[in-house]
Amino acid sequence: MEKTVEHQRGAAEQRTRTLVLTGLLAALGCVGTMVLTVPSPTGGYMNLGDAVVLLGAYLLGPVWGAVAGGVGPALADLLAGYVIYAPATLVIKALMGVTAALLYRRLRDKPGALVICGVAAEVIMVAGYCLYDAILAGNPAGGLAGIPSNLVQAGFGIAASALLTLALRRSSYVRREFPSL
């Protein structure tokens, strides 16, 4: 009986830890999206939030990484006045998180894994916003106009998340707390 209680306590502590980390990474995703913004020609903005979306996916896995990755940047859209983009951002960034995390689980120890995972996730971002912008504009050209700025954002997101991940892997604390990183 005592072993069951200890097991339940450990499971509850793990759930609490996961929820706290998910909230923290969602908040970091919001801040990363809002702190350094460069307006794009389509009316949106480029930012560093993708770096946090990808890092969250690597740290938390597909489910919680998708939650943090979707909620944080969508909240940034709401707070920054880009309300019309919030639903798309929620879905697009969550799909980025799922994709990056699932690929990372398979490729983690392979050379170039962080770049491959990042590129796969960022393709979703570029295509997702292209489609959404086309819907908003009422024509395909409206969606195509945002591709160059989204590609720049994607490149920064991939590079920053890869550098952060590699730096975090060097920490014994991070390796102990996140063995799958």
Image (spheres, rainbow, N blue to C red):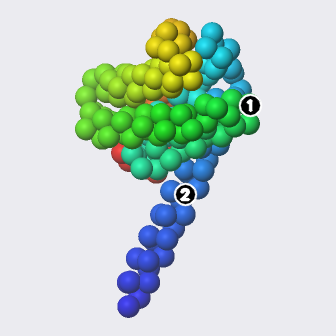
Instruction: Please give the residue where the numbered disc 2 appears in the rendered image.
Output: 19
Q: Is residue 67 visible?
A: yes
Q: Earlier in the sequence, mark 1 or mark 2?
A: 2
Question: Which part of the image, by quadrant, shows the C terminus?
Answer: top left
Label 2 amino acid? Leu
Q: Residue at x 32, y 40 (%)?
A: 102
Mark seen at residue 157? none
Question: Which part of the image, by quadrant, shows the N terminus?
Answer: bottom left
Q: Is residue 29 visible?
A: no
Nearest the viewer among 42 and 38 is 42
Drawn side of residue 107 relative to residue 78, left or right: left
Percent position of residue 25, x then y:
58, 43
Drawn side of residue 64 relative to residue 100, left or right: right
Q: Is residue 118 above or below residue 60?
A: above
Instruction: Please give the residue where the numbered disc 1 appears in the rendered image.
Output: 81
Drawn side of residue 146 relative to residue 84, left or right: left
Nearest the viewer among 160 and 143 is 143
Q: Is residue 12 above or below residue 128?
A: below
Nearest the viewer among 130 and 118 is 130
Percent position of residue 34, x then y:
69, 29
Percent position of residue 100, x then y:
38, 34
Q: Residue at x 49, y 64 (%)?
A: 15
Q: Residue at x 43, y 34 (%)?
A: 96
Label 1 amino acid? Gly
**Mark 2, secondary structure of its residue:** helix
